[in-house]
Image: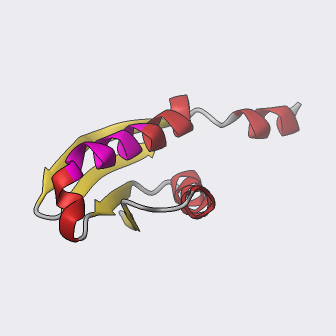
Amino acid sequence: MKQIRFGLKIGAHDLEIKMNKVRKFLEAGHKVKLTIFYRGRELAHKEIGFKLADKVIADFGDTIVVDQAPQFAGKQLNFVVRGSGKSSAPKAEQGE
């Protein structure tokens, strides 16, 4: 199992880079544990982390299966995903 960590205030480009890394792990057959960590007063806005987790899951679409739903523990929001066996759209076009 691989793990990727990022903060609640991650920028769009930084998130894209992390998601590409997750995609590579999934293609290699690994499960990936994604952790969103909170700092200080960010704990007062737990819903922002759940929205970010939902966005990450939605971005992958049908290519992943959520093994463990987003769950808040301590100062972290954790969830586990694995590949569904379906390839993403750009890979399917290359095969034709």
The stretch in magenta equals: 45-54
Residue at 42% over, 61% down: 9
Quarter occupied by residue 43: bottom left
Which residue is situated farthest in the bottom direction here?
40
Task: Where is residue 19? Give x, y as percent.
Answer: 55, 55
Quarter occupied by residue 93: top right
Classify the position of the C terminus by image quarter. Answer: top right
Residue 53 lies, with reference to residue 24, above or below; the image says: above
Residue 68 lies within the magenta run: no
Residue 38 lies, with reference to residue 78, above or below; the image says: below
Task: Where is residue 41? Give x, y as percent.
Answer: 20, 64
Q: Nearer the viewer, residue 71 or 94?
A: 71
Quarter occupied by residue 65: top left
Q: Is residue 42 left or right of residue 88?
A: left
The reply to whether residue 63 is visible in this rendering is no
Q: Is residue 60 left or right of residue 68?
A: right
Q: Is residue 24 left or right of residue 73?
A: right
Question: Magenta span: helix, strand or loop, mainly?
Answer: helix
Residue at 36% over, 59% down: 8
The reply to whether residue 8 is visible in this rendering is yes
Residue at 46% over, 44% down: 56
Q: Nearer the viewer, residue 92 or 49?
A: 49
